[in-house]
Image (tube, rainbow, N blue to C red):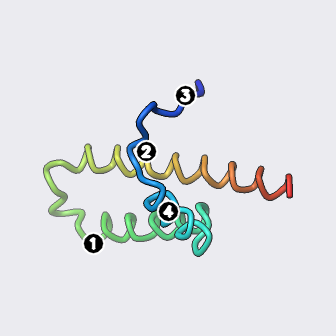
Amino acid sequence: MAHRKAPVRPLFTEEAIYRFDNLLEFAPPNELREYLLEIYHHYIIHEHETLPCNFSDMAESMQILFDLLRFLEEERKSKLKKR
């Protein structure tokens, strides 16, 4: 995957980044990913007869989120090794 430069004007404030960092300290990315996968799979199992019409878009968004959490876990592990 190609590395991209940070945006000139970040989308998030320092406060938002701080809060996100706190979330990941409480629930590391891999744990958060596992929790969300379990919830997502339960949703699919229970709603298989009546999935929303935008399910394909929702599934794609969830995959992007899961990929992000996997990447964040790798980043976290890399930073912890350097300490």
* Label 1 crowd bin: few (<14), some (14–19), many (20+), radius 10 Å: few
Q: Position of residue 39 (x, y in %)?
A: 40, 70
Neighbour tally class for label 4: few under 14, some 14-19, many 20 plus, Cα within 10 Å: few
Going by the image, does 53 lie left or right of 44? left
Mark 2 burial class by Cα count in 10 Å: few <14, some 14-19, many 20+: few
> What is the distance, in whole Å, between disc 3 and disc 2 at their CAs?
19 Å
Q: CA distance from mark 1 to mark 3?
A: 41 Å
Q: Which residue is mark 1?
A: 46
Q: Position of residue 26 (x, y in %)?
A: 59, 75
Which numbered tag is attached to residue 13? none
Q: Which residue is mark 3?
A: 5
Distance between mark 3 and mark 4 Cα atoms: 20 Å
In the displayed orientation, state which residue is furthest to the bottom. Answer: 26
Q: Is residue 80 left or right of residue 51?
A: right
Q: In the rendering, which numbered label is found on residue 64?
A: 2
Where residue 69 appears, as percent x and y from the top left, is 54, 53
Most distant residue in the top direction: 2
Q: Name the residue at 18% across, 48% down.
A: 54
Percent x, y of residue 33: 52, 62
Disc 2 versus disc 4: nearer the observer: 4
Q: Amino acid at mark 1?
A: His
Q: Amino acid at mark 3?
A: Lys
Q: Element type at marker 4?
A: helix
The mark nearer the N terminus, 2 or 4, is 4
Q: In the rendered structure, are the residues bearing label 2 and label 4 in contact, judged by CB atoms less than 8 Å apart?
A: no
Give the mark nearest the N terminus, 1 or 2. 1
Rendered residue at 46%/32% (across/down): 7
Q: Quadrant of the N terminus?
A: top right
